[in-house]
Image (spheres, rainbow, N blue to C red):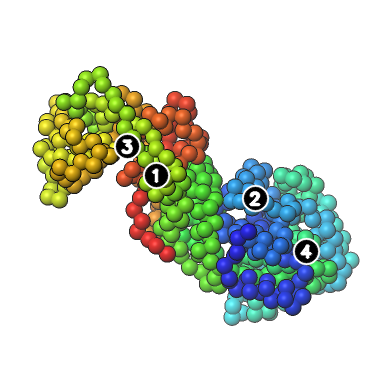
Amino acid sequence: TKQSSTNFIRNIVVEDLKAGRVQEVITRFPPEPNGYLHIGHAKSICLNFELADEFKGRTNLRFDDTNPVKEDTEYVESIQEDVRWLGFEWDELRFASDYFEEMYNRAVLLIRKGKAYVDDQTAEQIRETRGTLVEPGKESPYRGRSVEENLDLFARMRAGEFQNGEKVLRAKIDMASPNITLRDPVLYRIAHAHHHRTGDAWCIYPMYDYAHPLSDAIEGVTHSICTLEFEDHRPLYDWVIAECEMDSTPHQYEFARLNVTNTVMSKRKLKALVDEGVVDGWDDPRMPTISGLRRKGYTPEALRAFCREIGVAKSNSLVDERMLEHFIREDLKLKAPRTMAVLRPLKVVITNYPEGQTELLDAENNPENEEMGHRQIPFSREIYIEQDDFMENPPSKYFRLFPGNEVRLKHAYFIKCEEVVKDEDGNVVELRCTYDPETKSGTGFTGRKVKGTLHWVEASQAVPAVFRQYEPLITDEAEEEGKPFLECINPNSLEVLHGFVEPNMKGAVGHDKFQFFRHGYFNVDPKDTTPEKLVFNRIVSLKSSFDP
Ligand code: ATP
Ligand code: MG
Ligand code: MG
């Protein structure tokens, strides 16, 4: 089992165990099923599961399904799939909605104790009378309602006698508290909406600040880990646990949420990208969702290593996206076979190679991992190279192909460019080259040297393939300009190319991963690939410009 690196929450856990304050560490991952999980959630998942795991504790997956309007079973399913794919198995699968009856009963208890009241003010009035950091709030005219009246009204709220927004249940705490969260927070609201699990059984729903601590307590959670923006809510969390007289006392701890450069990470924005058709669903490889990263070609190992590296801090920070890329390169370096793919093909005819002849050349599958063995690749008179590996009038220091220049073909021979064939518009459509049989790769030829090595694919057996390369959907600079979010989309976020791969890749299936020589790591797209058409998503280029 893996060791979590030391962090302040882990230190608290260690102390709690040592002092006997807890017998067993119980954590939970509590997503709201209102969207797909993203890389930020992965950080929370790793933290919660690995922490419990290290101390032989338990972790629940609990859906925070208290907002029926935005929630859906599609999300419930995708979230489970993503947590499992990341490599974690929950102890119990729970839903906050499992506890609606108990939460209701605890609210009745609060009313009986004079700690909660029904307020007829509108949401707007409640917001306006909440006060500010320097000004206390104003008490609601309904704050003094009797226990009997509150019990009656709350029961009638549940029975469906009132419209949405007509009434709420509020905690009676302190409208003058310096902590605005404690100024009589709303505990229940009316929402005549169908719930994906409880159907039409309820028309009142608990608020997060009420439902969350109770759910934690009911499950016996010991360490309830959330993001920093809930720090001010902690006194309310403790108030709910205490005033509702829960048997177990969970504690809330806050850590910094993950932000990544050039990456939007709010479900609201991600949903807008999906709904507006900017992307091809939540799992579009440009999305920072776990399903998008998976489809792009990220591995669970890389995401977990990334989460471990960024650590758990108490202050918010922005992590460079190149760090994420570093970890997938590291993970695939020894795992992914190295093959050749031509993304923008240019035909080359080797005029002195015998017509109708094909030979098989030996190629190692991964020079850094001998165990991956060798393969045979065909070579003949016609091959494809990359369009930008040729220039008719190159600048100095251009070591690839140009008229009169000689280069090495990876795993094959030296070729020399003798003639350039153009179409009517002057575009280069074919090169005519000669090869030197003496220079065959692996024979130890040392007669002369060339500076450039090109990748290529034999033409007659080449397998057509589609390649997709990505740029950020939205850059940090675009977002900073203050334009509406959907006007910040990068028009070049997706580039689709039609080229060729080696014939031995014909049987590749979804999620097979390769390193294409000089291009980078690619994943076989699991959705768009068919037996007739291979589609590759670029996971990451080869350049490693970042080392943590
Ligand atoms: P979003 O703002 O993207 O909708 P959320 O916090 O509302 O995120 P939840 O489904 O409520 O989404 O989150 C489940 C858990 O994941 C919470 O404990 C939350 O704190 C954590 N989480 C969400 N986003 C991040 C992030 N960027 N970094 C770390 N943890 C996160
Ligand atoms: Mg949330
Ligand atoms: Mg949210």
| First of labels 4, 3 by sequence position | 4
Q: Which residue is mark 2?
A: 33
| First of labels 1, 2 by sequence position | 2
Q: Secondary structure at mark 1?
A: loop
Q: Which residue is mark 4?
A: 220
Asked whether mark 3 and ligand 1 are closer than 8 Å, the reply comes as no
Q: Is residue 486 above or below residue 131?
A: above
| First of labels 2, 3 by sequence position | 2
Tell me which amino acid carries mark 1: Asn
| First of labels 1, 4 by sequence position | 4
* Residue at the image point whose x is 86% and y is 72% from the top: 113
- Of 233 and 75, the residue lying toward us: 75
Q: Nearer the viewer, mark 1 or mark 2?
A: 1
Q: Secondary structure at mark 2?
A: loop
Residue located farthest toward the top when viewing the structure as drawn: 356
Q: Which residue is mark 1?
A: 366
Q: Residues within 10 Å of mark 1 (few under 14, many from 20)?
A: some
The CA span between labels 1 and 4 is 50 Å
The CA span between labels 4 and 2 is 22 Å
The CA span between labels 1 and 2 is 42 Å
Spot occupied by residue 226 in the image (x, y as percentages of width and height): 63, 65
Q: Is residue 442 above or below residue 464?
A: below
Tell me which amino acid carries mark 2: Pro
Q: Residues within 10 Å of mark 3 (few under 14, many from 20)?
A: many
Q: Quadrant of residue 48?
A: bottom right
* Residue at the image point whose x is 15% and y is 39% from the top: 406
Q: Is residue 370 left or right of residue 414?
A: right
